[in-house]
Image (spheres, grey):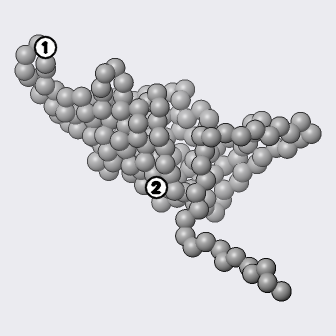
Amino acid sequence: TSNIDGYLSGNFHIGGNPDALDLNGIAAVTDGLLHVDVTGVTYYFSDSLSISNDTLTLNNFSIHDGEGNTARVNGHLIYSDNDLLLDLNLAAPRIQVLDSRSGETFYGRLLASAEGTLTGSIAHPAIHVRASTLEGSELHVPVDNKLQVSEGDYIHFVSYGPRPLRQSSNK
């Protein structure tokens, strides 16, 4: 991400002793935005979340793309041992996931319906998404004579639903 912005305000209760403070409250995020460099998409948000000590809880937290499509996020962000742990669920009937006008490997505009989870830590996230592209999507993959093939173990494609029937080799 290259840009995270917004305002946070709220009512908080701070108590306990100085070595172990308790922080609880409701925070309102206004004019929030998050730009994802690799996809070119900026997401906007103005919603509330609850804070309980080291945990931020999102309950139907709304995120919008530039076209007004909405995704809902539920779950927790937990600060632990100088790391941010993720336990988030996302549901979007329609959301922009790519808005790139040029690129060496791919570019285009993709709209998708998606459900997914984001777990793990910021340093080592685990992202699991079930998505379908929607009408109005375009993906361009430039191919030139300098084609290089490599294998990556970080993306796994999984097909859900019935398997195709095998044709018999008997003649």
Q: Nearer the viewer, residue 162 or 5?
A: 162
Q: CA distance from mark 1 to mark 2?
A: 40 Å
Position of residue 136 measured from the top left corner of the image (x, y, whole percent): 65, 59
**Type of residue at label 1?**
Asp
Instruction: Determine whether, in the image, residue 129 is placed left or right of residue 27.
Output: right
Position of residue 37 measured from the top left corner of the image (x, y, whole percent): 59, 32
**Type of residue at label 2?**
Glu
Element at badge 2? Answer: strand
On residue 19, which mark appears?
1
Element at badge 1? Answer: loop
Residue at 86% across, 39% down? 147
Q: Which residue is mark 2?
A: 115
Residue at 47% across, 31% down? 124
The answer to whether residue 11 of the structure is visible from this angle is: no
Q: Nearer the viewer, residue 69 or 169?
A: 169
Image quadrant in which you'd find residue 83: top left
